[in-house]
Image (cartoon, rainbow, N blue to C red):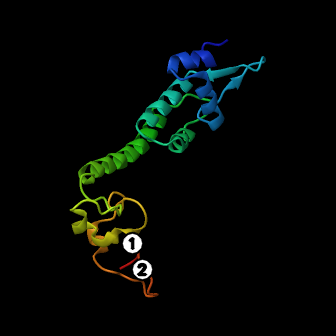
């Protein structure tokens, strides 16, 4: 076996990922095995990094579909270059920054009214009186990006139907 190729067991030992998980990732297209004449899987050394990236990205909270999309931008059949990894890094940084902002917002708002409609906190009456945040839809509206002031009046489209705060922000002035 050429030194540049690894068996699935070797890949498992090098990454700490179980053989069954490697097969799963292979089925999802994160790595691509080369088959020997005996139909055994062999992987490129660069697959160590691809799988390690997948592990780290999952620990950072990225969804498998996001990881798949990023790894799909890497070349198959040759080791990714530094430039290839830098491009992915820029994308991941953007996604991580959005998650950090959401976590900070959650941390800052969690003790108060989050716009979920429970109205159990005394302060909720100030921010979400009579559950007016429900106009924006289900869930914790303030954590999802709506603000208490978005619900201060009943803005309506020319058709007379209610407009959610998200629709208001998207619609032209």
Q: Quadrant of the C terminus?
A: bottom left
Q: Quadrant of the N terminus?
A: top right
Residue named by callout 1: 135
User: Disc number at residue 77?
Assistant: none
Q: Quadrant of residue 135?
A: bottom left
Q: Is residue 143 above or below residue 172?
A: above
Q: Is residue 160 above or below residue 148?
A: below
Q: Secondary structure at mark 2?
A: loop
User: Disc number at residue 162?
Assistant: 2
Q: Are marks 1 and 2 in contact (CB under 8 Å)?
A: yes
What residue is at 52 percent from the left and 17 percent from the top?
Answer: 14
| Left or right of 80 on screen, residue 8 | right
What residue is at 62 percent from the left and 22 percent from the top?
Answer: 43
Toward the front, the furthest residue is: 120
Provide residue 101's location: percent of width, then percent of height. Answer: 31, 50
Provide residue 111's location: percent of width, then percent of height. Answer: 24, 52
Q: Quadrant of residue 10?
A: top right
Provide residue 27's location: percent of width, then percent of height. Answer: 66, 34
Q: Is residue 110 above or below residue 123?
A: above
| Crowd around label 2: few <14 · some 14–19 · many ≥20 (10 Å) | some
Provide residue 33's location: percent of width, then percent of height. Answer: 66, 26
């Amino acid at each position: 076996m050429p030194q540049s190729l690894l068996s699935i067991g070797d890949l498992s030992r090098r990454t700490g990922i179980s053989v069954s998980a490697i097969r799963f990732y292979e089925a999802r297209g994160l790595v691509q095995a080369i088959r020997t004449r005996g139909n055994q899987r062999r992987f490129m050394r660069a697959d160590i990094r691809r799988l390690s990236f997948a592990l780290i990205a999952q620990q950072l909270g990225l969804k498998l579909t996001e990881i798949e999309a990023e790894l799909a931008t890497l070349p198959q059949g040759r080791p990714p270059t530094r430039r290839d990894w830098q491009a992915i890094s820029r994308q991941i940084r953007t996604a991580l920054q959005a998650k950090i902002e959401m976590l900070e917002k959650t941390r800052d708002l969690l003790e108060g009214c989050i716009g979920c409609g429970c109205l159990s906190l005394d302060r909720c009456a100030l921010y979400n009186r009579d559950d007016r945040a429900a106009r924006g839809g289900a869930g914790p509206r303030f954590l999802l990006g709506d603000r208490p002031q978005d619900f201060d009046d009943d803005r309506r489209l020319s058709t007379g139907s209610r407009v959610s705060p998200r629709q208001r922000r998207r619609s032209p002035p």
